[in-house]
């Protein structure tokens, strides 16, 4: 149960996340815990609502990419504060999944990847962003170290698409393909490409990435999926 | 030539000694906060008017110019490889703008064209560059390119992007790319020869995501010709020049060729709202001659939510940028159209009409497009929309912005609801007779009907 005073704290927390105020978000998360609010309630009533508000505001162009990144950082600060208080049995309710994300080799475009990364963080995924121009070997190594559930790869350049295929092949050849859901996106990626490389998911627009990842995680399937989830 | 080398060395030195800045701070802090500060200082907040996508207010465009000019001096440009900011003084910027060419000749023989600085509503016809980074398969590369350049409306070829070389994927930054650069030149020359336009200027190398395609195909025997063709240098957003781009610039200087610098700028991206995106793009354009040694340069505005620029935000932002530069400098400013629909659809032609018309009346020297389906589907480009875009951009030279704005307002509602789910249309081989290089009956009818609609709305396009 959350009483009126606690509701106020949660509302303030939501506002701080939406405003991208990392410091206030962290303080309010601590305040919420001191007030005895169950961390799971903070996730459900605070973080998830903030994520929804941020998504809507972005669609209406009331906030933009840089604010989205700040909101993602604020969200991360909140999660870092409350995670140690969450029982391991309840962990799945607070962290939806772990995602390693990268723009693949030969491509230095980061705007789409950063958009997806921010949306995933805001929506409760733990994201490890490797940056741009990342080789297949590095992506696989980092996914292993991070114990990722999902590998997200982006390419704007057509001539970098083969490196997505290379990464998938490396996972297959290393007998690691069944450990990760693979999602792909970016300006040059089409649903046909997703089918050809046997990835598990694709979203045309970055703001659909959380929905896509939730769907994959909730499917409880072992990758690769026989049919990818395509969100055009 | 040595002067050009020394000038580039000076810029490279600054890229190695300028103020240190992390990429994340540049993108998420400096760009948005500085652009916002300029918007406030110049009273430009919330000036985007979706009801009038083509700006008709000279005073507003002039104020945007001032804000962009100041931003260029105060912010500078970022080099991600050295994580430093390249700073330019006001005197240097002024000198660079003053000394930049306002008229150039490109190509040779019968295919020579003149690129000239234009003002808004200028009757001098802008040049039309077509198409843009459209992915095509080897099988259709020559056919599609030949079909495009057979259109006299197309003045400069930027060319399509090849998917493979002898069936092998062209991997960025690998020897496949080096080989593909030369292969791209050979196929393009063949297409120009078949079309009877061997002297046509080409912006090259399209198949060069890194520098290797450029080194393999430009300025080497039987490759793209630096005397006739132009080195193509593409850059990431916002206000950045990478070492990869500097390699291409250095190679172009070594070859003695002209340089086109093109970049994308995202509405809703790092800069933020349309107004901030416009200021950042103006600064980016102004810094292109001095930092990138660009003979001419262009911006592709894209809305981060849909990827194109045929919506109200895209059209307005483009109009403000181009008018600002056109009225306050003598630079050769280019604009890039990015359409969301595919060939054999009305929507593609509506989008082309809106973006090309906007470019023409806003004073661009060159309009470039189309980029159908944002260039992501192989062979979803045909010569017909390339012809159409050129017809619109040239027919609208001299038209009043207010008149163009009314036409655009009548056309946009025909496709706005489909911006997030645009029709894919048909690939070249399904809407063209590939032997005769003629559009199918269906595609031709769509083209004629849309032209009739435009004429009824007051667009002086020839039927």
Image (cartoon, rainbow, N blue to C red):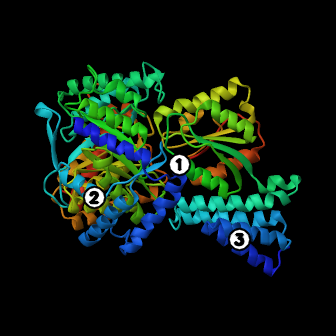
Residue B318: image quadrant is: bottom left
Upstream in sequence: badge 3 or badge 1: 3
Mark 3 vs mark 1: tell me if same chain: yes
Question: What residue sits 65% from the left and 26% below the top?
Answer: A170
Q: Residue B101: in sight, yes or no?
A: yes
* Label 3: few (<14), some (14–19) or many (≥20) C-alpha neighbours in 10 Å: many
Q: How far from the left and from the top, in percent, is residue B168? A: 47, 21
Residue B456, can we see it?
A: no
Q: Locate residue B155 relative to residue A160 in the image: left or right.
A: left
Instruction: Residue at 61% x, 64% y: name it.
Output: A54
Mark 1, residue position: A112
Q: Taking B414 as reference, is B98 left or right?
A: left
Task: Please provide percent x and percent y for residue B268.
Answer: 47, 59
- The residue indicated by pointer 2 is B322
Q: CA distance from mark 2 to mark 3?
A: 43 Å
Tag 3–tag 1 contact (CB < 8 Å): no
Q: Where is residue B199? Give x, y as percent.
A: 17, 30
- The chain under label 1 reads A
Chain hosting mark 3: A
Residue B243 screen position, x and y as percent: 42, 39
* Dots 2, 1 in contact, CB < 8 A: no
Question: Residue at label 3?
Answer: A13
- Horizontally, residue A101 falls left or right of residue B73, namely right
């Amino acid at each position: 149960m959350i009483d009126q005073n606690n509701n106020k704290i949660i509302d303030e927390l939501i506002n701080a996340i939406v405003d991208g105020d990392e410091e206030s978000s962290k303080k309010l998360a601590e305040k919420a815990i001191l007030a005895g609010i169950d961390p799971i309630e903070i996730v459900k009533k605070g973080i998830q609502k903030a994520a929804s508000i941020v998504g809507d505001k972005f669609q209406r162009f009331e906030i933009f990419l840089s604010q989205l990144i700040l909101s993602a950082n604020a969200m991360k600060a909140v999660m870092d504060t409350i995670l140690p208080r969450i029982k391991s049995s309840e962990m799945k309710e607070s962290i939806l999944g772990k995602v390693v994300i990268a723009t693949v080799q030969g491509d230095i475009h980061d705007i789409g990847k950063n958009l997806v990364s921010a949306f995933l963080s805001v929506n409760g995924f733990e994201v490890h962003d490797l940056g741009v121009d990342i080789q297949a070997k590095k992506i696989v190594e980092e996914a292993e170290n991070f114990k990722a559930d999902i590998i997200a790869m982006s390419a704007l350049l057509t001539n970098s698409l083969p490196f997505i295929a290379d990464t998938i092949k490396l996972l297959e050849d290393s007998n690691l393909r069944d450990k990760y859901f693979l999602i792909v996106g970016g300006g040059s990626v089409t649903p046909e490409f997703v089918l050809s490389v046997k990835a598990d998911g694709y979203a045309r627009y970055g703001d659909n990435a959380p929905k896509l990842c939730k769907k994959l995680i909730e499917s409880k399937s072992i990758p690769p999926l026989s049919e990818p989830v395509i969100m055009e | 030539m040595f002067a050009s080398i020394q000038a580039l060395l000076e810029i490279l030195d600054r890229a190695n000694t300028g103020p240190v800045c992390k990429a994340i701070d540049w993108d998420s802090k400096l760009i948005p906060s500085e652009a916002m500060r300029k918007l406030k200082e110049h009273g430009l907040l919330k000036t985007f008017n979706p009801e009038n996508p083509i700006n008709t207010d000279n005073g507003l465009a002039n104020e945007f110019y001032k804000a962009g000019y100041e931003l260029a001096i105060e912010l500078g440009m970022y080099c991600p490889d050295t994580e430093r900011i390249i700073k330019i003084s006001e005197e240097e910027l002024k000198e660079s703008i003053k000394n930049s060419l306002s008229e150039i000749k490109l190509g040779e023989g019968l295919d020579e064209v003149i690129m000239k600085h234009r003002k808004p509503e200028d009757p001098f016809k802008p040049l039309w560059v077509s198409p843009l980074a459209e992915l095509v398969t080897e099988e259709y590369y020559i056919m599609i390119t030949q079909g495009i350049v057979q259109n006299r409306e197309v003045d400069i070829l930027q060319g399509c992007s090849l998917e493979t070389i002898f069936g092998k994927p062209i991997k960025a930054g690998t020897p496949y790319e080096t080989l593909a650069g030369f292969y791209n030149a050979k196929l393009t020359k063949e297409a120009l020869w078949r079309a009877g336009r061997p002297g046509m200027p080409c912006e090259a190398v399209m198949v060069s995501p890194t520098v290797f395609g450029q080194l393999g195909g430009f300025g080497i025997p039987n490759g793209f010709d630096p005397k006739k063709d132009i080195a193509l240098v593409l850059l990431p957003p916002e206000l950045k020049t990478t070492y990869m781009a500097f390699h291409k610039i250095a190679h172009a200087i070594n070859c003695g060729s002209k340089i086109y610098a093109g970049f994308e700028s995202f509405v809703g991206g790092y800069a933020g709202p349309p107004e901030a995106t416009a200021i950042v793009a103006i600064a980016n354009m102004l810094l292109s001659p001095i930092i990138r040694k660009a003979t001419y340069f262009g911006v592709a505005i894209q809305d981060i939510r849909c990827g194109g620029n045929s919506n109200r935000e895209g059209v307005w932002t483009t109009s403000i940028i181009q008018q600002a530069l056109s009225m306050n400098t003598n630079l050769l400013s280019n604009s890039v159209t990015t359409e969301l629909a595919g060939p054999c659809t009305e929507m593609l032609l509506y989008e082309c009409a809106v973006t090309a018309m906007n470019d023409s009346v806003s004073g661009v020297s060159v309009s470039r497009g189309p980029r159908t389906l944002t260039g992501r589907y192989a062979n979803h480009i045909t010569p017909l929309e390339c012809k159409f875009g050129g017809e619109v951009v040239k027919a609208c030279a001299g038209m009043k912005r207010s008149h163009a704005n009314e036409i655009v307002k009548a056309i946009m509602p025909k496709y706005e609801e489909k911006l997030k789910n645009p029709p894919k249309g048909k690939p070249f081989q399904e809407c063209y007779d590939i032997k005769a290089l003629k559009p199918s009956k269906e595609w031709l009818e769509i083209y004629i009907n849309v032209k009739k609609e435009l004429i009824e709305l007051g667009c002086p396009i020839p039927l």
